[in-house]
Amino acid sequence: MIYRYFSGQRAGNFIGSYFYFLGKGYTAAELYSTTYGDGGITPQRYKTLACDDVKQIRGLIQTVAAYTNRTVNIIAFGEGTPIARKAILGGSCVDTRDSLGATLTTLVNTFISVAGVGYGKQFCNPQEGGCNLNNGMYCNSAFLTELNTPATRFEGQFSYYIYSDNDQIIGQNCCNTTVTLCSQLKNSNSYSRQPNMLHDSILSMTQDIQLAMLSSGGTYNGTLYQYGYGNNLYGINDPLYGLNGLFGYNGLVNNGINTGINALNGLNGFLG
């Protein structure tokens, strides 16, 4: 399985996801991630969907598939979603015109977009670099238009997306319409809607749903999932993945060590 995260984070930020899937039967030899771009040095509003980043992720997909001699599963988060989708789609880069090659669809079993840039960001200003009309995250950019043109699924054999009604980074409505969901993954098998989660918590708070999607063989059906794990696999007080657990929303390892909302570097933390 390959984790593909957004441009402002590094692979090591997601140690929580790594340990979660280890605890569910995956081995270290089956879990892969990488930091692309400059690992968050460039402010998000200026970071474009660059061809070099696409090439890096494409190479990782090909390498992992060859090394394991198996199809791969991909979990993409935020801006990592369009980068990973383009890496799979192939063709030419819109910014450099470099040729990537043929599609990698046959190398991917399940593709999951979590709080991803599907059709764009609701509050994207095309005058800012990261939202430019060529390889930016504005709804009608050339990059996103290409990804959302195919009439059939190309991301893998199965695909899903997870989004939240309260995602303050990606937003809800894109393309100047109330019917186009910013995080929607076109041609997906199904989705899961979260009513209360903020953007940075969606990945760690839906790990059980991600696992269910990966394990379903294309049969997963969308659900409305309440905050705090409620009646789901992990109760609110679960010591590892519950609301206050080590990997929970208030825990030490939420989206990375010491970045939980109440942890040292978190929203309410000493260095937050």
Image (cartoon, helix red, strand yellow):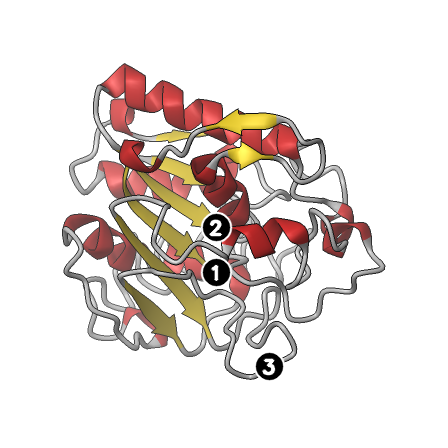
Of 59 and 75, nearer the camera is: 59
CA–CA distance between discs 1 and 2? 6 Å
Asked if residue 253 can be seen in this view, the reply is no
Amino acid type indicated by mark 2:
Phe
Name the quadrant containing residue 88. Answer: top left
Q: Are marks 1 and 3 in contact (CB under 8 Å)?
A: no
Residue ID for mark 2 = 77
Mark 1 or 2 closer to N-term? 2
Mark 2 or 3 closer to N-term? 2
- Answer above or below: position of 83 versus 45: above
CA–CA distance between discs 2 and 3? 23 Å
Measuring 26% from the left and 61% from the top, which residue is drawn there?
Answer: 189
> Helix or strand or loop: what does disc 2 sit on?
strand
Residue ID for mark 3 = 177
Residue 272 spot, x, y in % from top left: 67, 55
Residue ID for mark 1 = 115
Is residue 13 toward the left or the right of residue 264 in the image? left
Amino acid type indicated by mark 3:
Thr
Amino acid type indicated by mark 1:
Ala
- Answer above or below: position of 157 versus 115: above
Q: How many marks?
A: 3
Name the quadrant containing residue 209. Answer: bottom left
> Helix or strand or loop: what does disc 3 sit on?
loop
Asked if residue 222 can be seen in this view, the reply is yes
Q: Are marks 1 and 2 in contact (CB under 8 Å)?
A: yes
